[in-house]
């Protein structure tokens, strides 16, 4: 059975955590944990392209032809194709090298650049997967801490069009890790 939604309000926006499949979300945008070539791949990236259809890959190819590969920590936006979400924001999280390659800052940047792009496009709601914790090997406890901190500080620093941010975690273990990261962060204030 799926677990209950966990949520907090930060500066007029709702930050919530659910267990589920991000391709099924009806937020304005869903975020893809992409790779720099924007060619689709495994994990959540493959699932988004499969569910959204070829229009997403087509736009990704145009973007790469125009501006080259997407650097780690940056984000771009495409259509959501056949998804419920109108748009997909593709960002590249860092590969985990034991914490020696500025991974925390790059992961923070992946979340903040995605939110910035959503706000620039006047989006109201956005869903994130657990960026970098699959094939890219970032330890979940560390990644979840950076993820909730990045989103909370973005929401605290400015009021934008964004009123709802959802972490959509694929399994109950990851859901639990993100809930406890959020609880710890809120308790520290
Ligand atoms: P990365 O390369 O950034 O590590 P992955 O796609 O390998 O990205 O994994 C990131 C996270 O996305 C993992 O926790 C994985 O379980 C999760 N994931 C995979 N498919 C989905 C999905 N359909 N919805 C939400 N999360 C998903």
Image: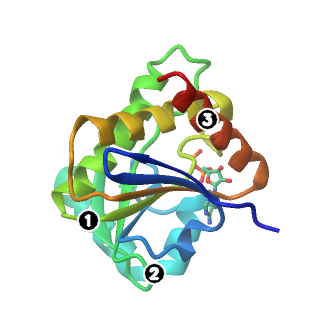
Task: Check if mark 1's residue and mark 3's residue have beta carbons within 8 Å.
Answer: no
Q: Nearer the viewer, mark 1 or mark 3?
A: 3
* Residue 108, quarter of the rendered image: top left
> Residue 104 at what x, y percent from top left?
47, 24
> Residue 176 at what x, y percent from top left?
73, 44
Q: CA distance from mark 3 to mark 2?
A: 31 Å
Residue at which label 1 appears: 123
First in sequence, mark 2 or 1: give its number: 2
Task: Check if mark 3's residue and mark 2's residue have beta carbons within 8 Å.
Answer: no
* Residue that extends furthest to the top in the rendered view of this protein: 100
Question: Where is 41 relative to 11, above or below?
Answer: below
> Residue 41 at what x, y percent from top left?
55, 60
Q: CA distance from mark 1 to mark 3?
A: 26 Å
Residue located at (51% from left, 73% from top)? 25
Residue at which label 3 appears: 183
Can you see residue 72? no
Residue located at (38% from left, 56% from top)? 90
Question: Where is 54 relative to 7, above or below?
Answer: below
First in sequence, mark 3 or 2: give its number: 2
Q: CA distance from mark 2 to mark 1?
A: 16 Å
Instruction: Give the colouring mode of the picture.
Output: rainbow
Graded by Cα atoms within 10 Å as few (under 14), some (14 to 19) or many (20 or more), the crowding at tag 1 reads many
Q: Nearer the viewer, mark 3 or mark 2?
A: 3
First in sequence, mark 1 or 3: give its number: 1
Q: Quadrant of the N terminus?
A: bottom right
Which is more toward the observer, 74 or 41?
74
> Residue 189 at what x, y percent from top left?
47, 23
- Find numbered disc 1 in the image and state the secondary structure of the residue it sits on: loop
Residue at which label 2 appears: 83
């Amino acid at each position: 059975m799926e677990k209950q939604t966990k949520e907090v309000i930060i500066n007029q926006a709702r930050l919530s955590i659910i267990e589920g499949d991000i391709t099924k979300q009806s937020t304005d945008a869903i975020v893809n944990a992409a790779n720099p070539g924007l060619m689709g791949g495994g994990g959540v990236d493959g699932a988004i392209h499969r569910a959204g259809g070829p229009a997403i890959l087509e736009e990704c190819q145009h973007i790469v032809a125009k501006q080259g590969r997407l650097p780690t920590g940056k984000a771009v936006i495409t259509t959501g194709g056949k998804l419920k979400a109108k748009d997909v924001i593709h960002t590249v999280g860092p590969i985990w090298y034991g914490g020696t390659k500025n991974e925390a800052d790059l992961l923070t940047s992946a979340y903040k650049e995605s939110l910035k792009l959503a706000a620039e496009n006047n989006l109201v709601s956005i869903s994130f997967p657990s960026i970098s914790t699959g094939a890219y090997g970032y330890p979940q406890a560390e990644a979840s801490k950076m993820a909730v901190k990045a989103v909370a500080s973005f929401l605290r620093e400015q009021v934008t069009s964004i009123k709802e941010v959802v972490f959509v975690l694929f399994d109950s273990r990851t859901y639990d890790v993100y809930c406890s990261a959020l609880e710890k962060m809120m308790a520290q204030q």
